[in-house]
Amino acid sequence: MNDPISSPPAAQTPGNTLTFWPRFHATYGPAAVGLFGGALTVGIASVSFTPVLRACGETYAKFPSLQAPWLMRDFTPHIAVLIPLFFVAVAAPFVMGYVSARLVRPKDGWEAVSAGLTTATTASVAAYLLWIGWAVTVATVVVPSIHDLTLFASSTRTPAEATAHPSDLMTGPYPDLKATPADARGDLLFPKIVSDQVVGSAYGVWVGGIVSAAVVGLPAFCGTLAAAWLLRRGGSRWAKLFSYFELTVATAVPLGLLLFAAVPVMLLFGQPLPWLRLAALGVVSAVVVAGVIRRWGWPLRLVAAFAWVMVLAGVGFRDYTSEALIGGDVRNHVSTTTVCATVVGYGGLAVLLVRRLVGRSNARLSPPPAS
């Protein structure tokens, strides 16, 4: 028996040197892919934050005695750089899973889940630190206070009426200040603004984490699971690539929208999708996933993808189609092209699904060929 103390380490034996890179990829690959892919999503922020920073710099230029922070600069890239950067940022969350699965090569579902969780977590953290946390904090702290800050600034002007006080402007939106002495109204409104910002900063942290997980983490996780399963199933490279995007988009987007709808604080960013549309999107997503798993023909899968896009866009909902078809007033509703697309998309998907089900039923009922 070999002495365990004197035997060489396992990493130095000739048999294990060949497994170093696969183990290295499996250990560090998902984290590296998540960090790099999450960082690439910063291109989305370049579209929205560049004008804001430029406006902040112009504001500080009116105070030449003050040193402007380094971030208040014009970082506007050239349009030839901005457009590709934006599209790379949008595509990055949906590509990370494929790259991570290619590096790790999960042997089963458990390894795929582990790689997907690592990729999704690191990508969400990277995107949150670089731009999502910043954007959400601005939306929950600065934007809600703009009205009160504007009111504060307007209250420093001399009123048009000689008998009026500058702080009388505060009593319009806040009638509770009418009973307060005129010179003390600002002392009450200022703590109210700070209180709103304190609560908004907490919302910013929570909502920022949810947005990061929904926008970046979910596509990375779903993509890793999809790519790992497709790599184990085999097939041509192009077929696997198309199927990968079908599975990733059809699962990550509905789950993200469901998360937005389930969290009430997401109302800060607009009205979430109605539950009817979410349910319809879930049904069509299940059809898309079933088409990939059961290897349906491309005509049916293309029609299913087209119907999925229409449900996501809300085409055919809110009774638009019915009012257009009966010849009512359609000036504020969908056009004839939209109605045709609705009929082709939803009707075509229903017809193809029925034909497939009928064909399978006939195949089961038909007698076996004579030997």
Image (spheres, grey):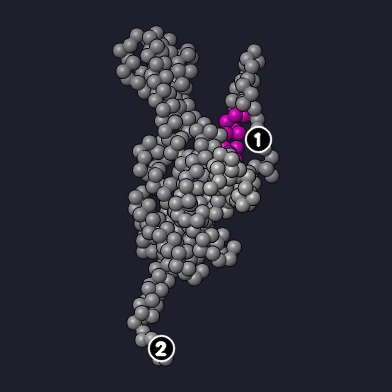
Q: Quadrant of residue 369?
A: bottom left
Q: Position of residue 25 (x, y in %)?
A: 58, 47
Residue under the image location 52 percent in, 40 percent down:
122
Q: Name the disc covering residue 347, or none.
A: none
What range of the chain is rendered magenta? 42-54
Which residue reaches farthest bottom? 371
Tell me the tag on residue 76: 1
Left or right relative to 61: residue 223: left
Magenta span includes 53: yes
For image coordinates 59% across by 40% down, the residue present is 6
Type of secondary structure dominating the magenta stretch: helix
User: Which amino acid is tagged 2?
Assistant: Pro
Count of marks placed on residues: 2
Q: Is residue 18 above or below residue 211?
A: below
- Is residue 178 visible to the viewer in this orientation of the structure? yes
Residue visible at 37% across and 52% down in the picture: 278
Query: Can you tell which quarter of the image residue 347 is in?
Result: bottom left
Out of 232 and 317, give the one closest to the viewer: 232
For image coordinates 35% across by 38% down, the residue present is: 264
Element at label 1: loop
Looking at marks 2 and 1 on the same chain, the residue that comes earlier in the sequence is marked by 1
**Helix, strand, or loop for circle 2?**
loop
Q: Is residue 343 visible?
A: no
Q: Nearer the viewer, residue 25 or 219?
A: 25
297 vs 313, nearest the viewer: 297
Residue 369 has which mark? 2
Amino acid at pointer 1 = Thr
Q: Is residue 237 above or below residue 124?
A: below
Q: Is residue 185 left or right of residue 104?
A: left
Residue 262 is left or right of residue 313, and the answer is left
